[in-house]
Amino acid sequence: MTAITLTDVVKTYPPRERGGAPLTAVDGVSLSIAEGEIFGIIGYSGAGKSTLVRLVNALERTTSGSITLDGREITGLRERDLRGVRAGIGMIFQQFNLFSSKTVWGNVEFPLKAAGVPVAEHQRRISELLHFVGLADKAHVRPDQLSGGQKQRVGIARALATSPRLLLADEATSALDPETTQEVLALLRRVNRELGITIVVITHEMDVIKSIADRVAVMDRGRVVETGPTFEVFANPREDSTKRFVSTVVSGAPAGDELAGLRRRHDGTLVTVRLSEGGVDQRQVFGLLTRHEVSFEIVFGGIDEIRGRTFGTLTLALSGDPASVRAAVAELGDAATEIEEA
Ligand SMILES: Nc1ncnc2c1ncn2[C@@H]1O[C@H](COP(=O)(O)OP(=O)(O)O)[C@@H](O)[C@H]1O
Ligand SMILES: [Mg+2]
């Protein structure tokens, strides 16, 4: 079952000033998100991620294209019907968006009241939600007495109050430190596994995607430039813009100034070797070079891990008999890219 299908979705904003140019924030996005998965959308600031989220939860209307939720077309629905659509979607935000004058209890109760859930049911539902997010003892405090992580737990409890089938998290951990981020992500994983809720995680942070997303779409200037299982997209990016993006968030191949510096310091053969499952691993690379009697120095690179699977690149300065170096590079084949001389 597909939870969300986007087909050629475009969102163009009118010019901000007279005579200005319209801005296409989302530019022909097609995506399909399966029920029960955790789907990541990553991209630089300004890529169009938040706009896409506002289209999916029907806070804004698409300029063209189609969005279906659980098979139901939402583009073109009347405002009255859209309210029902929104009720089936939970949202959490970077700044938590809690009511500062209400207690934790009051914040979680708010959507129950708005949805017209009978007051007699509030007690049981709220206490169940607060237990689930680990804040049963904080029911009567106000948000300003909570840590950032606790505030986001309240945000999650509130988002789950009306039992949505879909949770949209827009930069939900971007205001949190790395440790708290991991705690909140662990809670989101429980939301997914224990409650079976489909989650779309929007972020500019690679670490978030790495630790939680089953599949990922990379957005760049309004477009989805690549999509696939998280490990594949980051270990073997295909599109240039994905490679650029990935190289800024994982330790990749040297580029720009780093590359120029390496070239200055090493005048012999420089190769970047891509390590991956199904390809070569470090042990094989070092074994092969030793067999060819080629000496090497690791001058750049790093190994990364996504959900227990490793990948990375190593840039090596090779030295030895030129024929042996050539033979070794040839044997590395597709896994190695020789860096040309300056
Ligand atoms: N309401 C709006 N009116 C005009 N332009 C907007 C509006 N919302 C977003 N934009 C523009 O759309 C682009 C994408 O923004 P956004 O979706 O917020 O990106 P992201 O969430 O990836 O950082 C940006 O250039 C932004 O300035
Ligand atoms: Mg955003």
Image (cartoon, helix red, strand yellow):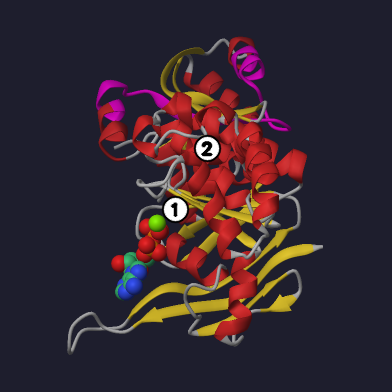
Q: Is residue 276 magenta?
A: yes
| Label 1 near ligand 1 (CB < 8 Å) | yes
Which numbered disc, 2 or 1, marks the residue that appears first in the sequence? 1
User: Could you give the CA–CA distance between mark 2 and mark 1, rounded to whole angstroms?
Assistant: 25 Å
Q: Image check: 334 left or right of 70?
A: left
Image quadrant in which you'd find residue 327: top right
- Residue sticking out furthest to the front: 120
The residue pinned by badge 1 equals: 43
The residue pinned by badge 2 equals: 153
146 or 82: nearer the viewer: 146
Quarter of the rendered image showing ligand 2: bottom left
Horizontal and vertical percent for residue 4?
68, 66
Q: At 53% across and 85% down in the image, what residue appears?
A: 64
Image disc number at residue 283: none
Horizontal and vertical percent for residue 143?
39, 38
Q: Residues within 10 Å of mark 1 (few under 14, many from 20)?
A: many
Instruction: Please provide the residue range marked out in magenta.
Output: 262-288
Q: Is 220 situated above or below 233?
A: below
Residue type at numbered disc 2: Arg
Element carrying mark 2? helix
Image quadrant in which you'd find residue 20: bottom left
Q: At 56% across and 68% down in the image, what residue appears?
A: 57
Q: Image check: 101 left or right of 276?
A: left
Q: Quadrant of the C terminus?
A: top left
Q: Quadrant of the N terminus?
A: bottom right
Residue type at numbered disc 1: Gly
